[in-house]
Image (spheres, grey):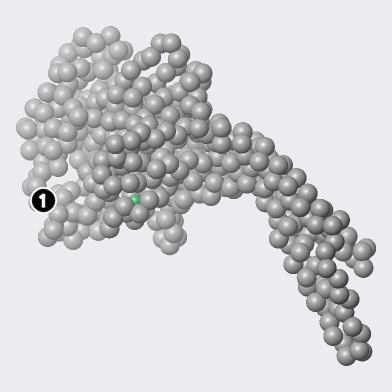
Amino acid sequence: MLRLLFFICLLALAVCAVPSLGAADPVKPPVAPVVSAPLAVDPVDRDVELFNPNVYSLDESGHGPKHVTRSPFTDPASDIAREVASVTWLSSLIFLPFLVLPLLLLLYVIFKFRDTGDGRKPATFTGNHTLEIVWTVIPCVALVLVSIPTWFILDKMEAPPEKQKDRMAVRVTGKKFAWDYKYLGIYKDPKAEEKQEIAVGQFLGIQEPLVLAKGRTVELHMTSDDVNHAWWIPPFGVKKDCIKGRDTYAWFTPDTIGFFKGQCAELCGDGHGLMIITSAVVEKPDFERWLALQRMKDDTFKVWTTIQPPAGTAIDDQALREVVTGFLAKGRSPERQYALRYWIACNYATLQRVPPPTGVSLAEVFGAAKGGGATEIAAAIRVRRAKVDVLLQGLVADLGPATESTIAGSSTAAIAVPGAQP
Ligand SMILES: [Cu+2]
C-alpha cells in the first residue's frame, strides 16, 4: 500500500510540474505573436495602425475581436507581470499537491476499506502526535517557500523605481466613462528632468490608447474625477484603484511590442463595461515620433474640419487651400507635413469607428452616395487624403525655399517620415 501511495504522489507531482516548469521561466518569450496583422505599407497608415489600432474591429474570420485581452500568466508583457506569473506558477506547483494528494488518498481509502460484508470491524483510535506534527510542519514550510519570492515582488511593485534612468511618468485619471492620460515627463537622467506635458484621452468619442516605449519604465500616477475606478491591463501585471482626492501609484517596464487591452476593474456605473483600457507598446524611435505627432495635433483640426464638410457637401477647394497655407505658415518641416497627413488619416480611421450622426450614413459623411458600402467609403477616403497630399506638396513647392533648416532641398515629391528606420 505504501508503495502505491508513493507512486500516486510521484504521478500527481509530475502532472502538476510538467505544465508549470516551462511557464515559470521568467525569460520565456510569449507563446502567441503579439502583433496580429502586418502593418500597412504607407508610413502614414502604418503609424495609424501602430498608435491608434481599431479596438472594436473583428478578426479576419469576422467572428472574434481583432485585439483580445491577453492572459498575464501565459503572455506577460512587462517585468512586473513576468515576476507575478513566475510566483503564481511556483505557488501552484507547491500548493497543488495539498489539493490533489488528500483527494487521491481519500478515494483510495474509500475503495480499499469499503464494507465488503466479511464482518471485519474498523480500527478505532484517537490522536497521533507524529502525524499532527508532520501535517503542521509541511504546510508551514510550503507557506515560507512561497512567501519569500512573494515578499520580494510585492516590495518591488510598491517601491517607485527612482534610480531607473530611462523612465517616464504618466498621470492617469479615470472618469465616467473614459480615461485621460497626461504625460508628465521623460526622465532619462534622474537629475536632469526634461518636462513635456502631452495630454491624450477621448478623441472623436473613441478612447485613445496609452502609448508606451518598449524598455522604458513607466510610473502611473492615478486618480479619479468622480467615482472609484480601477486601471487594469492584465499582461502588464498592474491593477490599481483610482480614487478621487487621492493619488495611487503603479509602475512597470513594458518589454513586448504590441497592442494590449484591459478593462476598468471597479464597478463605476452604467457605462462601466465601456471603460476599455488600451495600450500600444512601440519601439523608442516610434514613441518619439508619436510624441512629436501629438504636439502638432491641435494645429491640424482646422484642416480636418475643412475636408470633412457637412453630409453631402463637396470639399471647398479654396477654403482647403487657405487653411493648408495657414498650417504651413507655422512651419514647413517634414515633421509638420507628416503630422498633417498622419492626423487626417487618424481622423478618418477614428471616424470609421464612431456611429455617424442620426439620419446620416457614414458614406454621406465622407461625401459618397447615401447608403454607400465599405468600398465606396474607402474610395471617398482615399480621394480626400490624396487631395490634401497633392495640395501639401504643391504648396510647399509654391511657397519657395523653406526658412527651416530641417527641409533638405526644395523637392517635396516624397514627404519624409520623421524618425523612420531605413
Ligand atoms: Cu468602472
The location of residue 115, given as percent across then percent down, is 85, 85
Q: Is residue 113 above or below residue 303?
A: below
- Position of residue 321 relative to residue 356, above or below, is above
> Which of 66/141 is in front?
141
Q: Residue at x 86, y 71 (%)?
A: 125
In the rendered image, which residue does mark 1 sit on? Answer: 311
Please give left or right for residue 102 compared with residue 302 in the image.
right
| Displayed quadrant of residue 303 | top left
> 19 and 379: which one is in front?
19
Query: Who is closer to the viewer here, 214 or 271?
Result: 271
Residue 82 image point, x, y percent: 59, 39
Mark 1: amino acid: Ala
Q: Residue at x 65, y 37 (%)?
A: 149
Mark 1, residues whose alpha carbon is within 10 Å: few (<14), some, or many (≥20)?
some
| Element at label 1 | loop
Which quarter of the figure is the N terminus placed in? bottom right
Side (left or right) of 382 relative to 255: left
Residue 23 place in picture, x, y as percent: 66, 45
Name which quarter of the figure residue 300 lies in. Answer: top left
Residue 57, horizontal then vertical, whole percent: 37, 53
What residue do we see at 12% from left, 23% from top? 326
User: Which quadrant would residue 40 be assigned to in this image?
Assistant: top left
